[in-house]
Amino acid sequence: MSSGDTQNYKGQVDIRTESGVKITVQASGTGRPGETPDQIMGGLKQAAEQQYPNATVEAVRYRRT
């Protein structure tokens, strides 16, 4: 993969709301060139936290598409 390539990915973030309900948030996006898996997972986690600000993130998974 050359440094100019982008990578598409799909992810799931498991969160638990304040009331204890577990939700799996679907997410997808395009990684920037040179972005590490940790950065991608961090971005997915941030997106879920913005949607559900008081929830606890329990797990993040993703795969390249």
Image (cartoon, helix red, strand yellow):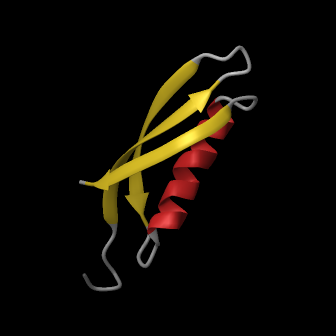
Query: Which x, y percent locates residue 50?
Result: 67, 37
Name the residue located 50 percent from the left edge and 56 percent from the top edge: 41
> Toward which corner of the image does residue 11 lie, by quadrant?
top left
Query: Which x, y percent locates residue 52?
Result: 66, 29
Query: Which x, y percent locates residue 58?
Result: 58, 39
Classify residue 34 as left or right of residue 63. right
Quarter that holds the C terminus = bottom left
Name the foreground residue: 32 vs 57.
57
Name the residue located 52 percent from the left edge and 42 percent from the top edge: 59
> Toward which corner of the image does residue 57 lie, by quadrant?
top right
Quarter that holds the N terminus = bottom left
Q: Tally the numbered discs.
A: 0
View extreme (bottom): residue: 2
Looking at the picture, does residue 17 appear above or below residue 9?
Answer: above
Name the residue located 63 percent from the left edge and 31 percent from the top edge: 51
Classify residue 19 as left or right of residue 33. right
Query: Which x, y percent locates residue 55?
Result: 69, 29
Looking at the picture, does residue 65 appear above or below residue 39?
Answer: above
Name the residue located 31 percent from the left edge and 57 percent from the top edge: 8
Classify residue 57 as left or right of residue 19. left
> Toward which corner of the image does residue 32 lie, by quadrant?
bottom left
Classify residue 31 as left or right of residue 14. left
